[in-house]
Image (spheres, rainbow, N blue to C red):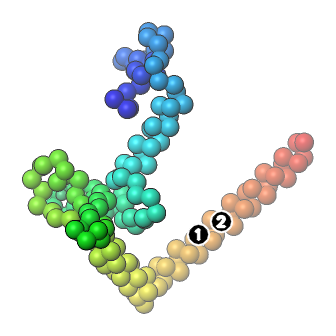
Amino acid sequence: MLENEKYIGLHTNRGTTYDNIFPAIVSKEVFDTVQKRILANKYGKHVPDVDYLLKGRAFCGYCGKPLHSATGTSSNGTIWRYYKCHSIKRDTGCQNRSIKKDALENAIIDVLTQAITSKKNFPLLMDGIINIHKRKIANDTEVRILEKELQKNN
Ligand SMILES: [Zn+2]
């Protein structure tokens, strides 16, 4: 319902979009705001003040679906944060259990830190940094040339 363009008065048939068949009952502005919100929440609910580092980047090892953020509160009020397979909610039979947020994120950070700081990967890291720097310099030069042309034209 939130993504149906008919609410803003649009009807698409065979690749052609019509805006004069029925009136809009939701403004385009509200519709666009909702679309942005849906896109932002694509990989799990927005949790204010909590960064899920692997949001949109971690996938279930059993079924391949994205892992979403999840929260649980224990009887003493402690809030536990997890990554949870999206399939569990839809009862598709995935065997994956929730994974504690900190445990998964720390494991990934450890692996990445080891990979980045290993002697074997050092040349790759340096090449990557040098290439980024070269691209930046090339873009800067291009911008300067275009700015000079703009000045001339003005
Ligand atoms: Zn799964």
Residue 67, picture quadrant: bottom left
The residue carrying mark 1 has its beta carbon less than 8 Å from ligand 1: no
Marks 1 and 2, how far apart in space? 6 Å
Question: Residue 116 sits in which quadrant?
Answer: bottom left
In the picture of the structure, the residue carrying the numbered disc 2 is 136
Q: Which mark is residue 26?
A: none
**Relative vertical location of residue 8 with respect to residue 54 in this rendering, above or below:** above
Residue 24 pos. (x, y %)? 47, 17
Q: Is residue 83 something that shows in the picture?
A: no
The dot on residue 132 is 1
In this rendering, position of residue 98 left or right of residue 151: left
Horizontal relation, residue 147 to residue 81: left or right: right
Q: Amino acid at mark 1?
A: Ile
Q: Residue at x 45, y 43 (%)?
A: 37
Tag 2, which secondary structure?
Answer: helix
Rendering quarter of residue 57: bottom left
Q: From the viewer's perspective, is residue 68 above or below residue 32? A: below
Identity of the residue drawn at 63% across and 71% down: 133
Quarter of the image that includes the C terminus? top right
Q: Amino acid at mark 2?
A: Lys
Residue 33 % position (x, y): 50, 37
Do residues under tags 1 and 2 come within 8 Å of each other at their CB atoms?
A: yes
Image location of residue 147, percent across then percent down: 81, 52
Residue situated furthest bottom in the rendering: 119
Q: Looking at this view, name the residue that lies furthest to the front.
A: 76
